[in-house]
Image (spheres, helix red, strand yellow):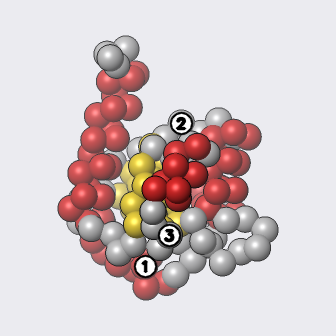
Amino acid sequence: MKVIYIEDNLTNRFLMEKTLGQCFSVDCVEDGHKGIELASSGDYDAILIDLNLNDPELDGIGVIKRLKGELGIQSYFIAITAYTGPEWEQKCRDVGFDEFLSKPVKFPKLKQLIVESAQKVQESEDGNTP
């Protein structure tokens, strides 16, 4: 399974790559522009996006809008953020994220979500969705 993580923080990218890299093929990029470029050139099972990318022109919300809306990328989108609360989760779901995780990320939960996302995508492709 292929996963991309779009995150501006070097330490967070390192941790994600080392932890998820034990189970999946993981590509990490440091900004939304590179994330959009990479996501549009590859077939990723899950796209993990930090909401605050430290870029005044393109945050995580802007990235998902471009990927899903403008480019029609079909993947499983997971918001990963330091923001918490039901209002942030709803905001993320409203723009198209499939899941919402607050930092610090619990890696067993994230791994489970990625595996389940692949199953959901496969069921959808097979026409077996309820």
Which x, y percent locates residue 28?
48, 68
Quadrant assignment, res 19: bottom left
Precedes in sequence: disc 3 or disc 2: 2
Q: Label 2 near label 3: C-beta < 8 Å?
A: no
Q: Which residue is mark 1?
A: 12
Q: Residues within 10 Å of mark 3 (few under 14, many from 20)?
A: some
- The reply, left or right, for residue 109 in relation to residue 80 is left
User: Which residue is depicted at the point 57% across and 51% down?
Assistant: 91
Q: Nearer the viewer, mark 3 or mark 1?
A: 3
Please give the name of the residue rendered at 65% of the width and 36% of the height, measured from the top-left corner: 72
Kind of residue at disc 3:
Tyr
| Element marked by disc 1 | helix
**Residue 130 image offset from top left, x and y in percent:** 32, 17
Q: Which residue is mark 3?
A: 83
Q: Is residue 40 visible?
A: no
Q: Tell me if residue 70 comes above or below residue 35 in the rendering.
A: above
Mark closer to the chain start, 2 or 1: 1
C-alpha span from label 3 to label 1? 15 Å
